[in-house]
Amino acid sequence: MDFSSKLLAQAVDEMAQLPGIGKRTALRMVLHLLKQPKEQTIAMAKALENFRTQVIYCEQCHNLSDVAVCEICASTKRDSAQLCVVEDIRDVMAIENTGQYQGKYHVLNGIISPIDGIGPQDLTIHSLVNKVKTGEIKEVIFALSATMEGDTTIFYINKQLQDYSVTVSTIARGIPVGDELEYTDEVTLGRSILKRVPYADSM
């Protein structure tokens, strides 16, 4: 694709690095931005810069946050005895949108996937086990995608928790096997949280 402007070519190349965005789509997006008020485009660029340079991971749950401890972990209205284990930030958002869960979270930042070179040591499993060791957690709820990798991750973590006095449950299988949690509709996901079952009974 030939461009009359090197700056245009550079902008398209950068935009095309986003997932699912090819060169033609990137070109349309860049030309759209060019038609917008200059201030709007600059504000967008500044927001992205601030996000990339200032966002951090919550030191307690590993969720994305603007401060050391995120709003969910800092809230005194949440049930600190319940811990919902999810793959990433998108799953936290999906569950929060259901309005059916009032506990706290632990974000693994991935799932065990040998084919992708991701092992237990690459996730936040160690800090999860340390939380359970304190005895403050009474229930660990696994809310991972119904995939082979998700099930493998649950199985591994459950073995790490067997020596501790904690109830281990998993969301009900109202979610089709093989589906990603973030794409599940809010009603189905909400019901799956409410009708969670003991992990041992789900195997």
Image (cartoon, rainbow, N blue to C red):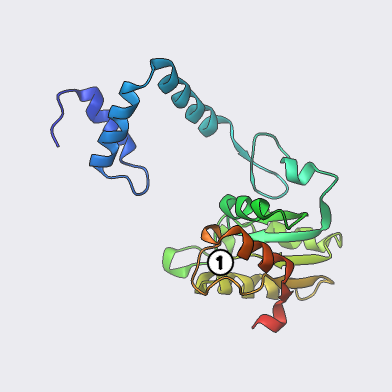
Name which residue lies at 71% across and 37% down.
68
Residue 37 falls in image quadrant: top left
In the foreground, 202 or 95: 95
Image-based side of 75 in relation to 118, left or right: right
Task: Say left or right for 38 vs 53.
Answer: left
Neighbor class of circle 1 (other Cα within 10 Å; few <14, some 14-19, many 20+) is many
Question: What residue lies at 47% left-to-right and 69% top-to-bottom?
Answer: 114
Name the residue located 52 percent from the left edge and 70 percent from the top edge: 149
The image quadrant that residue 41 belongs to is: top left
In the depicted structure, whether residue 42 falls above or below residue 78: above
Q: Is mark 1 on a helix, strand or loop?
A: loop
In the image as oriented, which residue stretches furthest toward the front?
A: 187
State the image quarter where residue 58 is shown.
top right
Report the number of discs.
Answer: 1
Q: Nearer the viewer, residue 156 or 186?
A: 186
The amino acid on which the numbered mark 1 sits, given as a three-letter code, is: Ser
Expressed as whole percent of the image width and height from the top left, the position of residue 21 reads 32, 45
Closer to us: 5 or 186: 186
The C terminus, quarter of image: bottom right
Q: Describe residue 178's horizontal placement relative to residue 139 as left or right.
A: left
The x, y position of residue 1, in whole percent, is 14, 37
How far across and how far down the image is residue 13, in percent? Answer: 27, 35
- Which residue sits at x=73%, y=63%? 129
Q: In this view, does 180 lie above or below 90?
A: below
Q: Name the residue under label 1.
A: 145
Vertical side of 171 occupied by 108: above or below: above
Whether residue 195 is situated above or below residue 2 in the rendered picture: below
- Residue 77 position within the rendered picture, expressed as x and y whole percent measured from the top left: 84, 47
